[in-house]
């Protein structure tokens, strides 16, 4: 079983910054990908940023240059630094990880966090 603990959401004014963190714990062999998705009211969940075990990172076009994803492999934790926040960044942010639960045969497990609300006011 794998658990994710998210923190860092809240209310911030436009132009401000927030930092989200997500720590993974439990029984797994290794972590493949770690990242964040978000879901705004009335919209579908969308990818914000994701990083792989090979340290490559992908960002949604809407957050490039403003958000930075980082990963601490020793702590099994991923961070999302959000700068220059805009009202349209308001959403529930969900941590997502893909872990390897068995090396041979190779089996993966996808886990979602409970979500943390980010509200950007004008």
Image (cartoon, rainbow, N blue to C red):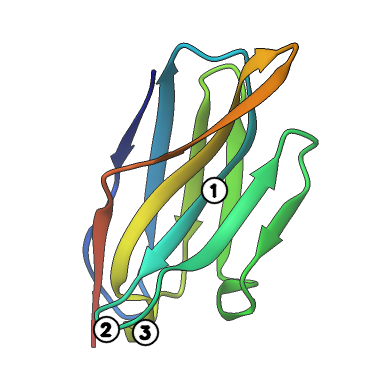
Any mark on residue 8, and which?
Answer: none
Give percent across and percent down for residue 36: 48, 53
- Placement of 23 over or under 11, stated as above or below: above
Give percent across and percent down for residue 23: 41, 29
Whole-angstrom CA distance, mark 2 to mark 1, is: 22 Å
Near-viewer residue (92 or 1): 1
Element assignment for label 3: helix
Whole-angstrom CA distance, mark 1 to mark 3, is: 19 Å
Q: Viewer-nearest of labels 1 and 3?
A: 1
Q: Which residue is at 60% across, 43% downward?
A: 70
Element assignment for label 1: strand
- Placement of 94 over or under 62, stated as above or below: above
Compare marks 3 and 2 and give the one earlier in the sequence: 2
Mark 3, residue position: 88
Compare marks 1 and 3 and give the one earlier in the sequence: 1
Q: Do the residues labelled 3 and 2 touch (CB within 8 Å)?
A: no
Q: Viewer-nearest of labels 3 and 2?
A: 2
Give percent across and percent down for residue 80: 49, 51
Element assignment for label 2: loop
The extreme front residue here reads: 105
Q: How crowded is mark 1: few (under 14 residues within 10 Å), some or many (20 or more)?
A: many
Any mark on residue 42, and which?
Answer: 2
Mark 1, residue position: 35
Q: Which residue is at 40% across, 37% downward?
A: 22
Compare marks 2 and 1 and give the one earlier in the sequence: 1
Q: Which of the 4 image quarters holds residue 12?
A: bottom left
Near-viewer residue (106 or 122): 106
Near-viewer residue (8 or 105): 105
């Amino acid at each position: 079983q794998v658990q994710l603990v998210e923190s860092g959401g809240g209310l911030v004014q436009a132009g401000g910054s927030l930092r989200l963190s997500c720590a993974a714990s439990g029984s797994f062999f290794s972590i493949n990908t770690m990242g964040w998705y978000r879901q705004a009211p009335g919209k579908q969940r969308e990818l914000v940023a994701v990083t792989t075990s090979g340290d490559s990172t992908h960002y949604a076009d809407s957050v490039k240059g403003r958000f930075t994803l980082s990963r601490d492999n020793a702590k099994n934790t991923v961070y999302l630094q959000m700068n220059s926040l805009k009202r349209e960044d308001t959403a529930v942010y969900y941590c997502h990880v893909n872990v390897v639960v068995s090396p041979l045969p190779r089996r993966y497990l996808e886990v979602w966090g409970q979500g943390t609300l980010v509200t950007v006011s004008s």
